[in-house]
Amino acid sequence: MKVMDRRTLVARLREVVGAPHVLTRPEDLVVYEQDAFLVAHASPDIVVLPGAAAEVGTVIALARAAGVPVIARGAGTGLNGGSIPVAGGLMLVLTRMNRILEIDARSRLAVVEPGVVNIDLSAASARDGLFYAPDPGSQGVSTIGGNVGNNAGGPHCLAYGVTGNHVLGMEVVLSSGEIMTVGSPAVDAPGYDLAGLLVGSEGTLGVITRITVRLLRQAEAVRTLLAVFETIDDASQTVSEVIAAGIVPTAMEMIDAVVMRAVEAAIHAGYPADAGAVLLIEVEGHVQALPGLMERIAAVAKRHRPRVLRQANSARERELLWKGRKEGAGALGRLAPSYYLHDGVVPRTKLPEVMAKVAAIARTHGLVIGNLFHAGDGNLHPTILFDPRQPGMLARVVQAGEEILRACVAAGGSITGEHGVGIEKREYMRWLFTEADLQAMRRVKDAFDPTGLLNPGKLLPDVMSSGAQADVKSPAFSVRPRAGLWS
Amino acid sequence: MSVASDQLIDRLTSELGTDSVITDRATLEAHAVDGLVPRAVCSPGDAAQVAAAIRVCGEAGAAIAPRGGGTAVALGNVPHRVDVVLRTDRLAALVEHDDANLTATMEAGMTLAHLQTHLAQRGQLLPLDPPRPDRATIGGIVAASTNGARRMFYGGVRDLVIGMKMVLPGGEQVKAGGKVVKNVAGYDMCKLFVGSLGTLGIITEVTCKMTPLPERALTIIARDGGSTAEGSGAFRLIDALFASTLQPSAIAVLSPRAGELVRAGGPGVATAVAVEGFTEAVDRHVRDITGMAAAAGLSAEVLEGPAHERLWAAVADFPRSREGEALVRLTVPPGAVATAVDALSRVDDSPVYVAHAGAGTIWIGVEAARAATVFAALTSVAGAQHGHAVLASAPPEVKRGLDVWGSPPPALSIMREIKQRFDPQQLLNPGRFVAFL
Ligand SMILES: Cc1cc2nc3c(=O)[nH]c(=O)nc-3n(C[C@H](O)[C@H](O)[C@H](O)COP(=O)(O)OP(=O)(O)OC[C@H]3O[C@@H](n4cnc5c(N)ncnc54)[C@H](O)[C@@H]3O)c2cc1C
């Protein structure tokens, strides 16, 4: 690749976005070498914080002329390494573009810049009795642009759907530097559903500079039920039977014993430390309807001998119940120097079986695995606790993770439900998709970004040379050392 | 270049068998697309035969028009060419209904009615409402992205499809998504194929999310008896609904003439609100909505059982193509439906429309002779509201003079690139899609 002289490029970038918004010193760049995929890192060569779509367009055109890859980044909370610049390059950090441009309460939609923090949109729409439904655990920091990049989910996506169900349209800057509108505030924009394709494209098709999202009406009432079970199997059976009974609660979250103990030690949420699993079930709707619904759910739970079945009776009690779920990851973090948070999906009926397999995998590898996850969707998050300083440990952790994901695939599920592929799961894509399936996806990539300028090395595995074994490589943790395209 | 017909037909016959390739005049004419009569109609029996048929057509340079139940065959521009109509009628099996998991996988040619009958026995449904569910197939509904009034509550086709299998123009058999309700492994290829109108590949199998059958379902129908200006009472009611926490599953506003067509009874504009769910929730909706209707100056009546079902079947059936008539689909943000309906009555003094007010979709019936003029006027109405007007059905002679999808979409260049990469030979429905793709 032809690389433009670095000094010239930096000077041009400073003209476009202003000198303070172009970072080049190693001590400034180091902040951007990692996301929440804690086991890999690589430094960008240049970081640019644009203030408007037109600037993004010019920056991309410059990067293209210079032959430098472009990596979009929101808050960097992604768990798949999607914003790690594995091939170096220019990172576009969109956090300065954080204006809510419009809230149309009557049409229940909002237009936002990509750097808007998820929770800020719900806070702003609450004035009109509305909210933005996708609620990833990271919603206090992650950006809507990053949520769109990864098609983020969250606890309440069980009833309300994931990010892709709430994005109507967007403005996107292509690898040519051209600014384009896809989708629209009205449904069924003629043509291919490019907005649908861009959701979950992990910054590989275009850089999103404006998003039109759907807002929902806040429910009149909410009820939260805490059910504590002796075994994780009882909890899993309950989830599966609630769904089979034709009830789709707004959220159905599970916390296992490992996480419960960690949470208790940290914040005293009131979970019994010796039980097998906790289910947090929430329903929303009208005051007249909720008691009946709660009774039906409780009846299902009772078949599995819960030790505790408790309803939150006030907003404060509800918050406390949720606090345990929300702080779960942080609390786990205190149990070990590092953790590897996985993300797999299975048909909900397969939860009991696959949870048993996860436990067996932990035993085989002598690892501690905690589980707190979106059980209602069948979306597992086994979290492997480990000490990276122990020799050979990372390899064991990766091995266990792969076995878990293989178990999900074998059960008819998928390698990722909401965290995405990034660098982490590129190679695992072959477990789900044939070379022909992947080739169809590559056609999409080529249509948008024929030269491969945008976020190289993510989402799709490399083309398999003919005759090569369908052997899966482990994730590329050892990425390019800090050196830079120009050194 | 295209080979002789008999050679093409011989090759198809040797791949699919004599019974699956039909060439008699009457059948060919019955499968004409916008007046273009194909040279053969074939019905492959499985995905491998679909692939074989596509390869044969590819080698012969023969254009393919995929076809399910034929209920949406009027949608799209007049194709450049139609050589072979490829039917999915022999791909009609239910592959798997994982009822405990609320998902089901169907072959593309299964009719929606057939599926619903099966699902109902297990207390579930697929909440899609196309015209003619007895003929409309799953594959056709997905390819044409046929949405109905319940979209506001259950989501549209794009939200309900979680996986599919398709055969691409090169004959490759590929899949997208899977059978789990959350899945972000790679690009969401299902989204690309939903609404692609058979221009990228032939869908052979679809997996969707199902919904539990509601415990109770009914309709509150509110009428202005012709007393208010076009729909103003209706939209006062709808504004009140939107300002509340109520969650109806569908809202349809019927113009007086559309009301007659769907036999909604009574003069004036009618607003039908469907409510589905557990009994306590439904009762609460009836109470509140009846009150809102009275406050908006409307008289309300509750329809239950067969009357409720008949009404919504007729509403779903309204946008079907009718001989000698044209149909325009106007989509706007939900808050702009009232303004659009108002503008509509300035285009036509006594418009025939059904507005899915929750989703923002307005279906307008027009006499064929006035279709081009009305479509042009509605295109500006749509433009003013950030929406879209599509001439969803019209006689070919009307369609030839215009692009039924309206002006080219802003992202046309990318759409072209995609079409070019999937179908470089222009085999599938050439010319039918936006900007004659
Ligand atoms: C504690 C914790 C809890 C979490 N809980 C959840 C959860 O419940 N559900 C869930 O789904 N995820 C969860 N996540 C993962 C993560 O927060 C989400 O993936 C989130 O959407 C990432 O947003 P971000 O702003 O941090 O994006 P980043 O990490 O900066 O970027 C994510 C991806 O999107 C791309 N991207 C970013 N901005 C743009 C743009 N403007 N245009 C194009 N591409 C762009 C990037 O290149 C990258 O590939 C959690 C993470 C943490 C650390």
Image (cartoon, rainbow, N blue to C red):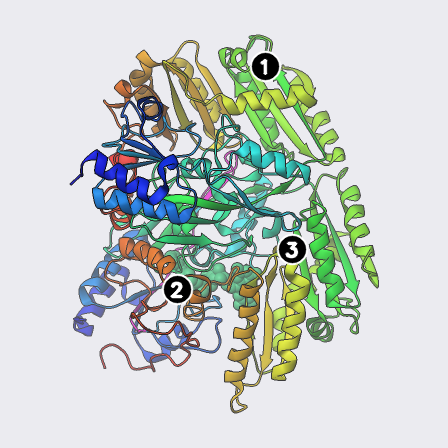
Residue A51 visible in this rendered orientation of the protein? no
Q: Chain of mark 2?
A: A
Of callouts 2 and 3, the N-terminal one: 3
The residue carrying mark 2 is A459
Q: Chain of mark 3?
A: A
The residue carrying mark 1 is B264
Q: Looking at the image, which residue is at 68% across and 72% down?
A: A259
Give the CA distance from mark 2 to mark 1: 52 Å
- For this orientation, the residue located farthest to the bottom is A391
Q: Is residue A54 above or below residue A478?
A: above
Magenta extent: A87-110
Amino acid at circle 2: Leu
Mark 3 Cβ and ligand 1 under 8 Å apart = no
Spot occupied by residue B358 in the image (x, y as percentages of width and height): 53, 31
Identify the image quadrant of residue A43.
Answer: bottom left
Q: Which mark is residue A376?
A: 3
Q: Chain of mark 1?
A: B
Residue B27 visible in this rendered orientation of the protein? yes
Give the CA distance from mark 2 to mark 3: 26 Å
- Depth check: give the residue in front, B372 or B26: B26
Q: Are marks 1 and 3 in contact (CB under 8 Å)?
A: no
Count every numbered label the image shows and give the total.
3
Q: Is residue B324 above or below residue B26?
A: above
In the image, taking residue B274 as reference, residue B201 lies left or right, namely left
